[in-house]
Image: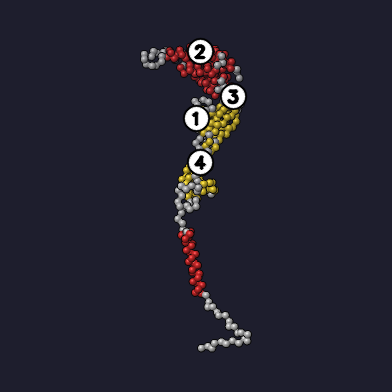
């Protein structure tokens, strides 16, 4: 790779092109007084001044400051030479994805009216060749497919069949057009942020060597759901899918799915409900327990009275059904004689 100082020398050589960078495509026309429209010659003059200041900063390898001035100059007056300078600054700062876009743009925008000198065109092509050997290519498999993805705090840009990190403005991640895709990023340490409703966000830091080509699996884990169970009667026993989990009120964390909830308390009718719990969401159950109507057979006075009735019935039955008692045999005395009464 060429040393950044070579780029500095190239940039210094562009100072003489300042006027061409700022050259208007058509003769400037005077703006009406008080219209608020900036005269073209003022924009041209400022673009030229910013460009010249950028060249001086690039000579001192102050790439970030020079980049800012070149970008401001390009906003006022676009020219392929200025775009080329932007690409060289981005290259020197290690922003290879952005440098590829700028240098490619400088080559594509060159025209007879705004020409990129042949030497610079060759340099731009040489830079682009080296950038392709430096960039990291990842075969990404994303789960779930509609998760939002950001790299270094920026959503991904779509360039044909591939996605590219580092080109868009900072913002939240967006879902890519497909689950499996090729991702092009700068080498070094990159921060991946994945997000989706119902899943736990992931922030992943990975370091890639220049020219890396490898697969990358990005998978989000489902968040558990929260189940809050309360009752009109405290200390009711709570059963979820047949397992006792405590007494109400309570809070449970469970994977998404369908659950059978049962609340029981002595003296009250059981309360049963089915609830569907979504990942990362909360479901509430407020059980209204209804006191049971005690059957007559379970009341204390019923069995007391029943015992007395049963005892009386046993006595009457015995009196009716008992046999006649027989008299003891007569004592015959010592002589064995027995006088029996004569029968009538």
Mark 1–mark 2 CB contact (< 8 Å): no
Tag 3's secondary structure? Answer: helix
What's the distance in space between the residues labelled 1 and 3, CA to CA? Answer: 27 Å
How far apart in space, not on screen, are marks 3 and 2 (Cα)? 30 Å
Cα separation, mark 4 vs mark 2, equals 62 Å
The residue that disc 2 covers is 52
The quarter of the rendered structure image containing the N terminus is top right
Circles 1, 4 touching at the beta carbon (< 8 Å): no
Density class for disc 4 (Cα within 10 Å; few <14, some 14-19, many ≥20) is many
Residue in view at x 50 percent, y 31 percent: 174
Mark positioned earlier in the residue sequence (1 or 2): 2
What kind of colouring is applied to the model shown? Answer: secondary structure
Q: Which marked residue is nearer to the observer: mark 1 or mark 3?
A: 1
Mark with earlier residue (1, 3): 3
CA gap, disc 1 to disc 2?
36 Å
Among the two numbered marks 1 and 4 on one chain, the one whose residue lies closer to the N terminus = 1
Q: Secondary structure at mark 1?
A: loop
In the drawing, what numbered circle is on residue 226? 4
- For mark 3, does the 10 Å Cα neighbourhood hold few (<14), some (14 to 19), or many (20 or more) residues? some
Residue 301 in sight here: yes
Q: Nearer the viewer, mark 1 or mark 4?
A: 4
Indicate the secondary structure of the residue bearing disc 2. Answer: helix
Which one is nearer the viewer's eye here, 194 or 55?
194
Task: Check the image and report above or below for 50 versus 152.
Answer: above
Tell me the tag on residue 172.
1
User: Label 3 belongs to which residue?
Assistant: 134
Residue 221 lies in what quarter of the image? top right
Which of pointers 3 and 2 lies earlier in the amino acid sequence?
2
Instruction: Evaluate if marks 4 and 2 touch, with contact meaning CB atoms under 8 Å apart.
Output: no
């Amino acid at each position: 790779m060429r040393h950044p100082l070579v780029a500095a020398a190239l940039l210094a050589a562009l100072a003489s092109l300042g006027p061409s960078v700022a050259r208007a495509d058509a003769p400037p026309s005077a703006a009406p007084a008080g219209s608020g429209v900036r005269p073209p010659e003022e924009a041209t003059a400022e673009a030229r001044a910013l460009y010249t200041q950028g060249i001086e900063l690039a000579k001192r390898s102050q790439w970030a400051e020079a980049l800012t001035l070149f970008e401001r100059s390009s906003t006022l007056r676009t020219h392929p030479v200025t775009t080329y300078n932007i690409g060289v600054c981005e290259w020197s700062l290690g922003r290879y994805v952005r440098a590829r876009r700028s240098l490619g743009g400088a080559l594509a925008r060159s025209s007879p009216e705004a020409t990129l000198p042949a030497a610079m065109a060759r340099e731009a092509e040489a830079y682009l060749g080296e950038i392709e050997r430096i960039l990291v290519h990842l075969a990404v498999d994303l789960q779930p497919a509609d998760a939002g993805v950001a790299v270094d705090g920026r959503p991904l840009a779509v360039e044909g069949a591939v996605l590219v990190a580092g080109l868009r403005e900072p913002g939240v991640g967006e879902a890519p057009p497909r689950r499996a895709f090729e991702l092009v990023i700068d080498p070094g340490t990159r921060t991946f942020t994945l997000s989706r409703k119902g899943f736990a966000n992931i922030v992943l830091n990975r370091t890639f060597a220049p020219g890396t080509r490898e697969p990358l699996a990005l998978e989000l884990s489902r968040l558990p759901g929260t189940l809050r169970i309360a009752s009109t009667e405290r200390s009711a026993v709570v059963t979820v899918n047949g397992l006792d989990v405590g007494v109400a009120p309570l809070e449970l964390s469970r994977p998404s799915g369908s659950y059978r909830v049962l609340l029981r308390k002595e003296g009250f009718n059981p309360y049963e409900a089915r609830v569907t719990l979504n990942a990362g969401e909360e479901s509430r159950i407020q059980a209204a327990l209804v006191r049971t109507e005690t059957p007559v057979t379970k009341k204390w006075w019923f069995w007391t009275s029943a015992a007395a009735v049963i005892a009386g019935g046993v006595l009457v039955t015995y009196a009716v059904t008992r046999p006649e008692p027989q008299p003891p045999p007569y004592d015959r005395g010592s002589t064995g004689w027995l006088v029996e009464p004569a029968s009538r």
